[in-house]
Every structure is written in C-alpha cells, then in structure tokens.
Image (tube, helix red, strand yellow):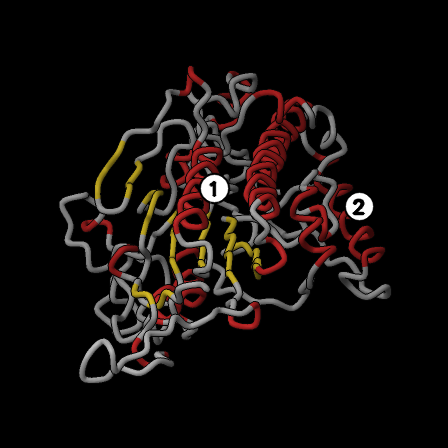
Amino acid sequence: MANKRRNGHANDPQDFEGYAGFTVKDSQFKYREESVRDKKTNVVYIVLDDVGFAQLEGFGSDIHTPNIRKLADRGLRYNNFHTTAICSATRASLLTGANHHAAGVATVIDTATGYPNALGHLDPQYATIAQILKEEGYATFAVGKWHLAPLEDASDQGPFENWPLSKGFDKFYGFMEGYTDQYTPSLIQDNSAVRPPKTPEEGYHLSEDLADHAIHYLFQQTNSYPGQPFFLYLAFGAGHAPHQVPEKYIKAYEGQFDKGWDEVRKDWFERQKALGIIPEDATLTDRNKYVDAWDDLSEDQKKLYARYMEVFAGFLTHTDEQIGRVIDYLEKIGERENTVIVLLSDNGASAEGGYHGRVSDESTLLWQDDDELEFGLKHIDDLGKYETGPHYPIG
C-alpha cells in the first residue's frame, strides 16, 4: 500500500474507495493503492544563460560538454527552437507558456515602460508551471537565477509576490538579479538573504553550490515522499558574465582558440553539418560587419581575445560538470528514466563584451572600449579569478 499525496495531503477525498458509515463498525477504510501506472513523470528544466547555439559540444562546438552531449544523444535535439532572445522574457514564456508580451515581460524585468507588455513583473493572471504542477501533487523547487521580480523588490524585506515561493515553488535557493558574481554571489534562500557556505579561498563557486542544493532538495524530497513527483527548475548563472572558473578549467583550453574566430566558426559550422544539425548544402554567412578579420588583428589582440575565449570555454565545461552531477544523482536514486529533462539557454551568445572584451563585466554597462585592450593585457593572467569579471569580445 502507498499513500497518495496531492497538495500535501494523503488520500484525497475524491479518490476514497472505502465506505464511511454512521459508526466505525459500519465503515470500511481503504488506502488507495498506487500502481506504476499512477506514477507521474518528474520534470527538470535546466536553463543556461547567454550560451550560443553552436557553443555546445552536441551542436558543433569543440568546447567539452559531455553531459549535455549525452542528453542530446539520448533525447531530442532541436535545430529550430526559438527563445525571445533576452533573459527575463524567455523565462516568463518558459514558466507560463504564454507569449512574453502577454505575460507582461517584453524585455528584462527591470524595464517597466508603463505599457501592459512591460509591467516590471509577471502578470499574475498567468500561472507558472510550478503553480499548475503543484495543483497536480508535485513538489516544486527553483534553484539559481530568477530575474522575474522588480529590482526594487529584490531585498529580503519584500514585497514577495513576485518571488519564487509566491509563484508555485516550495523552495528556492539562488539569486534574484540578472547576474551575480560566481565567487561572492548575492544569495537568497526561500525569502531570506543568506551568505555563501564557503569563501572563494575555501573553493566556493556558485555553479557548484547550485548543483549541491538541487541534489539536496531531491534527496530530502525522495527520502520523505518517495512516491511524490517533483519539478526542479535549475537556472545557472553560467555562461552569463562574469566568466569565472577555477584555473584548471581554463588551462584545459590553452591555445585552442589561437587560430581565431574566423577559423573556429568555420570548424563549428562544418561539424554541425556532420552532426546533421544543419543541411549539408548550407552556406556559412559572412562575418558580422562589426567584427574585424582575425588576420587583421595585432598579436596582442589575438593573444588577449583567445584568452577570453579560453576562460569562457572553461566556464562552460565546469557548468556541464555540475549538470552531470545532478543527472548522476537522478540515476543513483532510480528516477532518471522517469524524468523529463529539458535543457536550453535563455538566449544566444552575448555581445556585451564589446570590441576588446572586458576584464570587469560592470564596465559593460558603460559601453566604453577606451583602454580595454591595454587593461586586458595587463590582467590577462588574472582572467577568470575572483578579482575579475571577464567577458569575451563580440568576435
């Protein structure tokens, strides 16, 4: 016998198959037996940030993402899948199933225009998938980036109506803004601000912390209520700037991008043909008019720009490793085959690094390139460390 849980209650009255008489002697209790057929499918959404269509191994890249590649090989790989091409709006559509303009999120949530398509928050008439699944008996967890509440509401003093726990999630661990530092993030647990469990010197990294919490929530859930289905929304900060990752992941790509962006995009394009991602007779588009030919760059530019890409590649591989940990845990507890996993990025690769790349992502907001080359060369060996917040150049 197994108790059915729906909205947190065992044996919902509408499913009662016994008989309640005038006295106990006149009555017959009966627990509903849960068969394999009754078991609902778990759902896991994994959302990357600012990752381009061709930057994953299973879509043509030579950046090492073996766990994402396994998902693609075992499942469905989409080559005509569309997002809204900006973070908050894609997340609004993904979680509500509605057009982002209808849901009140035309662009980033921080931009409220006074029009109904840009409210600065989700239109409350559109339920999230977490709210819907919760009505169907699911446990619901959000881990990572939210970016669906107004910036002025991001303090843990509220108001909380646009926070994850008010949008159908039982638990939340992550950050409210569009991005945060990977080594010293601004963290929220449920409705309260918390400190990272370790310091950068002790080996802290946000992506690892998010994977730890996702696994912990699954551990708690499946041990307490093994028959209850779950929905996990796991939204990494990677690969949004700041691109920060331990040095060993960067060193793994040393020299890999020295041939430059013109040759790399050709290589990835041909690999996409071989994988069947694009038609064999497809023609590579011309280089973007805002991007210089790699061969026309100075040696200093080539050295710095390749280094920025090594940092990003290491960051993405490190993220893939954390995704693998979560999937391995699903396998360990016997839930992998009963779980639908959806992986996507909220938009494509970002041009926020400007022409020369950025040592600090905060300078992105100024859209200034003055001295970025000289400054980048000065700090080339520091890129990826917690003192920096780098982003690659537009090429």
Q: Which residue is mark 2?
A: 267
- Position of the C terminus, as image quadrant, is top right
Could you say which quadrant of the image residue 29 lies in?
bottom left
To which quarter of the image does residue 365 belong?
top left
Residue 227: x and y, percent? 46, 59
| Identity, as a three-letter code, of the amino acid under mark 1 | Ile
Disc on the earlier residue, 1 or 2: 1
Q: Is residue 309 left or right of residue 238?
A: right
Q: In the rendered image, is residue 100 in sight? A: no
Residue at horizontal 19 percent and vertical 49 percent from the top? 152
Q: Is residue 360 above or below residue 92?
A: above
Comparing 320 with 16, the one in front is: 16
Q: Which mark is residue 151?
A: none
Q: Gap between marks 1 and 2, in whole Å?
A: 36 Å
Q: Position of residue 271 (x, y in %)?
A: 81, 51
**Which residue is located at x 69 percent, y 25 percent?**
252
Q: For marks 1 and 2, give the one nearer the viewer.
A: 1
Residue labelled with disc 1: 215
Q: Residue furthest front?
A: 25
Amino acid at dot 2: Asp
Q: Position of residue 183 (x, y in %)?
A: 41, 27
Q: Residues within 10 Å of mark 1 (few under 14, many from 20)?
A: some
Label 2 secondary element: helix
